[in-house]
Amino acid sequence: MFAVFVVYGTTFPFRFDIGWHGFLREAQRINWRPLGGTADNIILSDIVQNIMLFMPFGFLGYFSLIYKSSLARKAAVVLMGASLSASVEFLQIFSPVRYPALSDVIFNTVGTAVGLLVAMSFKRSVLGFKTHPLARRFLDAPSAFPAIIFLGLVIAGCWEPFDFSLDVGLVISHLKPLIRHPFTFANPDDDLMSFIRFLLASLFMCRLFAEAGLRLPALWGAILLGALGGALELSQAFIQSRLPEVQDALVAMLGSAAGGIAYFFPGFHLRPRTWTLAGAAMIFLSSAARAWYPYHFSSHYSGFNWVLFMPYYEHTTFQALGDFIESAMLFFPLGFLLAYFHPGVRMEAKGVLLSGALAFVVEALQGFVPGRYADATDVLGAVLGGFAGALALSRGWPAFREYMARDDDEQV
């Protein structure tokens, strides 16, 4: 699926106007510089993006062969990443709006190798962490898996679109506005999304601390999640498309505090329908707040775009990927909560249907907002997010419990 996404995103908008007769002429457009850019200007951000774009391919490739891992199979994953990159660069020769480059193949291959190494390191870290007595005290708790899932969602939400930079000048330029005007508040168009993520992460973290036997679990859960929110916001100085803001840090802290308060609500499992409806309503409102800003509607309808990623193809890969991931992450909790409070058959289908229906309503009405355009891409992201949330619980949680119960650490 990730390979299909790469092919789709790197060949969009599918304008192949050059035939074989002009292949040799158009092949001269290939940038053969191994580091990309021009002779006087190497664009570091392009190198980082090309590496990070193919890291998931190497990561997933390693875990697809983990039970029969060998040096030859690991090398095959890297070669497949290189072949995928070379294939899409070759196709770009036939498109007048795309510019193939040798550097893309090189750094995509490096990204595949880095993703594979990260997966290997992740496996070793999990195996070592699993055997630690203090870690087992928390990992054996019933709420361990949901807490880990939503903790990861919180981190991903603060770091997407993951366009990290080590440019000192960029970091300083990001920190200057925070230092000079720390209490400048912007319009809260996406604050509710962050609030929900931190609320759920804090809620399950508090439950985890209580199950592990810690005193004052709600207080510690809210404090730790709030501190994490502040640290994650400050770390956005290293992300090119994000700016650290006091407002976002306060939203994270408020969400963490709300999770600590929600921990005391009675009937967490006795009223599953109430919790599900509350979660669905909050996710719908957060999606609407993001899509309908600045909340002015007109009688003119801008239309509905049914071509996936059409509004994004002129942007960089990471801008398009970041917006798509944001839509998926927004509806991930909905699929998870549906499966959590209503276990049974077809949990994934329920997550897909409800997420798709809510997202379609939001997108359809977005066409009445001046300057906004309804887009099927966001609906697809919501559907995949709802599906992933339900799948994480229906398949991921049992697999997590099975792994924790095993004594054989040779396989994950």
Image (cartoon, grey):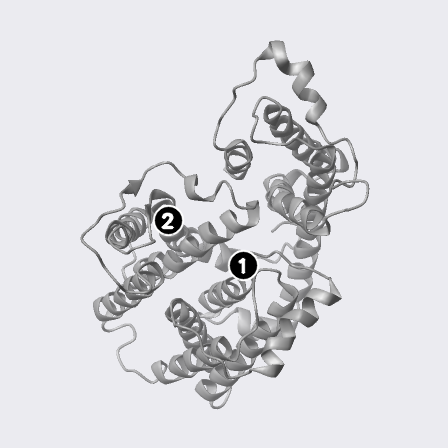
Residue in the image at 30% along x and 59% along y: 338
Residue 224, position as x, y percentages in the image: 54, 81
Q: Which mark is residue 180?
A: none
Compared to residue 37, the image places residue 130 above or below, namely below
Residue 248 seen anywhere in this rendered image of the structure:
yes
The picture places residue 172, in percent across and down from the top left corner, at 69, 72
Q: Could you tell me how many numbered marks the image carries?
A: 2
Label pair 1/2, CB-CB below 8 angstroms:
no
Taking the image as shown, residue 160 lies to the left or right of residue 238, namely: left
Residue 211 in view here: no
Name the outermost residue toward the top: 21
Q: Does dot 1 land on a helix, a strand or a loop?
A: loop
Q: Amino acid at mark 2?
A: Asp
**In percent of the image, x 61 and y 75: which residue is there?**
234
Outermost residue toward the right?
A: 39
342 left or right of 202 in image? left
Q: Element at badge 2?
A: helix
Mark 2 Cα-neighbour bin, 10 Å: few <14, some 14–19, many ≥20: many
Please name whichever residue, 3 or 343, is drawn nearer the observer in this view of the structure.
3
Name the residue carrying label 1. 160
Residue 231 lies, with reference to residue 322, above or below; the image says below
Circle 1 crowding by C-alpha within 10 Å: few under 14, some 14–19, many from 20: many
Estimate the x, y position of residue 56 in percent, counting from the top left.
60, 46
Cα distance in 3D space between marks 1 and 2: 16 Å
Q: Amino acid at mark 1?
A: Glu
Q: Which residue is mark 2?
A: 378
